[in-house]
Amino acid sequence: MDVVLNWKGKMAFEGVSDTGFVQKMDADGVAGGDNSAARPMEFIAIGLAGCTGMDVISILQKKKQPVTNFQVQVHAPRAEEHPKVFSSAVIEYLVTGKNVDEAALLRAIELSAEKYCPAQAMLSKAFPMQLVYKIFDEDGKTVVKQGEYKPK
């Protein structure tokens, strides 16, 4: 992968990778920016969520699970001192649908964590991650199953 980062003034940058899609970055006013775009560490957390999320939903679709809504939340506190790295992460998979099979979801999470997601494989070497899930009934409000994936 190749990435080019172009400075746009103050603390604003535009990054472009092999796909050609432009991603904007900026800092808040205290750091000299205009608060006009996401921060670099946000992109890392979004990348982690996107990597595992794409794996899990793809596997659930292959398993013909009746998913009507799917969300991945990453809760990643940062260290107080510079360089203010992520100190841990909780990845939460929120799945909505009628009779979504818990075993299918656990297998999808396992495959993402153990085999397919390069972001998770790389970042798990830097800080601990907890993988939790909730399965909601088709109303999107009633939790029918919840738990945690733990490696064997």
Image: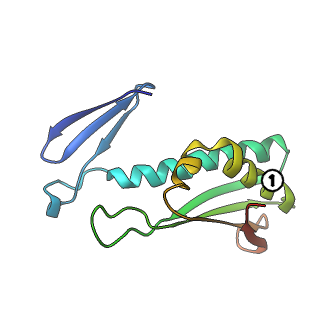
> Where does label 1 land, which residue?
107
x then y, percent, for residue 138? 78, 63
x then y, percent, for residue 149? 73, 64
Q: Quarter-wise, where is residue 6 in the image?
A: top left
Q: Quarter-wise, where is residue 3 in the image?
A: top left
Residue located 60% across and 58% down the image: 72
Left or right: where does residue 109 sit relative to residue 49? right
Q: Quadrant of the C terminus?
A: bottom right
Residue located 13% across and 56% down the image: 32
Q: Is 132 located above or below residue 124 in the figure? A: below
Instruction: Count how many numbered circles sit on residues in the image.
Output: 1
Residue located 29% across and 46% down the image: 25
Q: Is residue 101 in view from this perspective? A: no
x then y, percent, for residue 73? 56, 62
Q: Is 138 located above or below residue 47 in the figure? A: below
Amino acid type, label 1: Arg
Label 1 sits on a secondary structure element that is helix
Q: Is residue 125 in view from this perspective? A: yes
Left or right: where does residue 116 sit relative to residue 31? right
Left or right: where does residue 90 sit relative to residue 144? left
Q: Quadrant of the N terminus?
A: top left
Camera-side residue of 101 and 122: 122
Q: Quarter-wise, where is residue 29 in the image?
A: bottom left
Residue located 24% across and 40% down the image: 13
Crowdedness near tag 1: few (<14), some (14–19) or many (≥20) residues, C-alpha within 10 Å: some
Q: What's the image's color scheme?
A: rainbow
Camera-side residue of 141 and 70: 70
x then y, percent, for residue 79? 36, 70
